[in-house]
Image: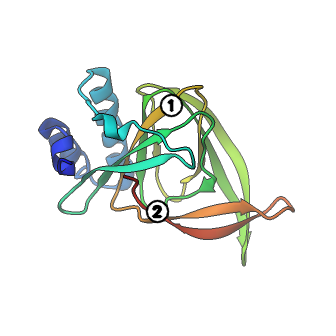
């Protein structure tokens, strides 16, 4: 298997390197979003087949590139029909999510309140996203659910502001509130 660095073109790395130096997280995320959308619009992204394979048990999460300075990582996710995440956050890390192939639904939530171990959320937006659509998640506005709407696999690319090795998952408590659990994240294959 090739080193992750070799899987990403030098041009894309250069553009992302410049984007993550754009200052505050809002500017960084907007610049990264522009880079990803432009890369897809120009058909300048070629993913090896191993990044496109789905799993029956969950969406596949594969590392494509890790910046040697630790400023960002690029993760490719392959989604089988109907696969989705739980309501989750990114544990304080900014992220840009982009649809490479297929159709995804992104539902964003606002945290309304929390007390002790109970959290209340309100749905803010629901977006149907196709190839080239991208969105930014910037803490504290990072609560969301991703769902594959297509009957076939969908592929997404996620650029995180560091290594995202865990997140917080919010599970319904049965009374309209949610309980938060920390979920360790790993890469597949």
Query: At which x and y percent is residue 96?
Result: 41, 44
Along the horizontal axis of the image, is 135 left or right of 50? right
Dot 1: few (<14), some (14–19), or many (≥20) neighbours within 10 Å?
many
The colour scheme of the drawn protein is rainbow
Residue at x 60%, y 49% (from the top left corner)? 85
Which picture quadrant has residue 163?
bottom left
Residue farthest to the right, as pictured: 175
Along the horizontal axis of the image, is 69 left or right of 36? left
Q: Which element is circle 1 on?
A: loop
Q: Nearer the viewer, residue 182 or 35?
A: 182
Which residue bears the numbered disc 2? Answer: 185
Which residue bears the numbered disc 1? Answer: 153
Looking at the image, do the residues carrying marks 2 and 1 touch, with CB atoms under 8 Å apart? no
Along the horizontal axis of the image, is 123 left or right of 4? right
Q: Nearer the viewer, residue 119 or 66?
A: 66
Query: At which x and y percent is residue 91?
Result: 49, 65
Q: Which element is circle 2 on?
A: loop
Query: At which x and y percent is residue 136?
Result: 45, 44
Residue at x 34%, y 57% (from the top left corner)? 161
Residue at x 21%, y 56% (from the top left corner)? 67
């Amino acid at each position: 298997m090739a080193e992750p660095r070799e899987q990403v073109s030098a041009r894309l790395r250069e553009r992302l390197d410049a984007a993550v130096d754009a200052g505050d997280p809002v500017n960084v995320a907007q610049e990264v979003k522009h880079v990803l959308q432009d890369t897809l619009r120009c058909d300048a992204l070629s993913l090896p087949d191993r990044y496109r394979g789905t799993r029956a048990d969950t969406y596949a999460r594969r590392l494509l590139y890790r910046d040697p300075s630790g400023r960002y990582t690029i993760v490719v996710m392959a989604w089988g029909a109907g696969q989705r995440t739980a309501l989750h956050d990114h544990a304080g890390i900014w992220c840009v999510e982009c649809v490479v192939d297929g159709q995804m639904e992104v539902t964003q939530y606002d945290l309304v309140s929390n007390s002790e171990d109970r959290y209340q959320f309100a749905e803010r937006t629901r977006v149907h996203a196709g190839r080239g659509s991208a969105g930014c998640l910037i803490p504290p506005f990072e609560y969301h659910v991703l769902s594959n709407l297509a009957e076939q696999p969908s592929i997404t690319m996620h650029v995180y502001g560091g290594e995202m090795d865990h997140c917080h998952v919010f599970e319904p408590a049965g009374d309209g509130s949610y309980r938060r659990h920390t979920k360790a994240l790993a890469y597949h294959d």
